[in-house]
Image (tube, rainbow, N blue to C red):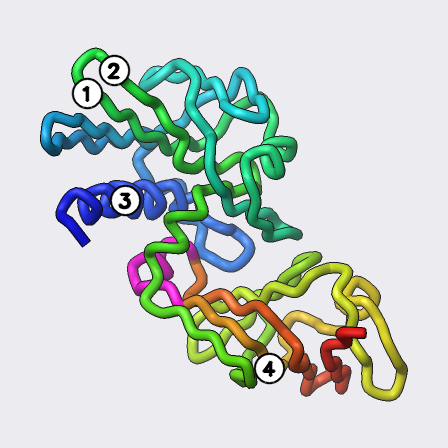
Amino acid sequence: MNQGSKYLIFIVLTVLIVASIAGVTLYSSNVLAEASSSDDTASEYKGVKYNVRIFNGTITSITNSNITIESDVFSGTLSTNGGWIYIDSELIKRGDWSSVYGQLSEGDAFIAMLSIEKGDRSLNILLGLKQNDILVFRARVLNRYTSRWMHTRNYFGIYGKIVYKGENYMAINKHGHNILVIVGQETEWYKAGYGVVKWSDVRDEFNEGDTVRIFYHNILILNNRLAEYLGFKAIIWGYSGSIIDLDSGTALMRYLG
């Protein structure tokens, strides 16, 4: 990796860490009150100026290709091209801006942006924002800043205690680390002693405080610093295995038809 790439990744990581201080309040401490309401990080590399700004502002317009904001720090339109991660109290999803912007609204938000200037040319880019219980940030950040990604055609297995449950995910705790377990709302499972069900039909049988065992194919492990600010250490997804609640006795095996 060349020095320029390392530098750009450092900028994006810095933004994600600060933007995520607002946090997924479902399972991380609320440290937003401890964060500065405005923070700038300006640098220059080979004649290109980079300025990261993190601040409280007001969204005045949202379209399927950009967002317009007003604040004492910056007022103008930010580009939103690219892939995004969306997290709220019930859902986690990944998609382009058009799949997430509809959940946002005009009004106050905690904003992270990047300005790039070279000569008389400039570009202003949205990197992430927090509005109420909604957190959105660019997918490239999560993709790049992980300590390890593991995949197997067989199964990994893990025990953990459920600490939060949304519509299409659970947060479980293992040895003091929170792990997001993504489960599609309409995925089909074979429930022991019952038959084929959808996750949306049986999710209420998995309760906060229950111990579960999960067999899965993919795990993305975040580096320690990123995990500290996001409030979770890893993301699990991809099942043809099973989810077993050791307290309620509910046992599911992925049904693939």
Q: Residues within 10 Å of mark 3 (few under 14, many from 20)?
A: some
From the image, state whether disc 3 or disc 2 is nearer to you.
2
Which of marks 4 and 2 precedes in the sequence?
Answer: 2
- Measured in 3D between alpha carbons, the distance from the residue under mark 3 to the one under mark 1, in whole angstroms, is 21 Å
- Measured in 3D between alpha carbons, the distance from the residue under mark 4 to the one under mark 3, in whole angstroms, is 34 Å
Q: Residues within 10 Å of mark 1 (few under 14, many from 20)?
A: few
Residue 252 x, y percent position in the rendering:
75, 80
Segment colored magenta: 221-230
Nearest the eye: 23 or 93: 93
> Mark number for residue 245?
none
Compared to residue 131, the image places residue 187 above or below, namely: below
Amino acid type indicated by mark 4: Phe
Residue identified by numbered label 1:
118
From the image, state whether disc 2 or disc 4 is nearer to you.
2
- Measured in 3D between alpha carbons, the distance from the residue under mark 2 to the one under mark 4, in whole angstroms, is 51 Å
> Mark number for residue 14?
3
Query: Residue at 23% of width from left, 42% of height from top?
Result: 8
- Measured in 3D between alpha carbons, the distance from the residue under mark 1 to the one under mark 2, in whole angstroms, is 5 Å
> Mark number for residue 215?
4
On-image quarter of the N terminus: bottom left
Residue identified by numbered label 2:
121
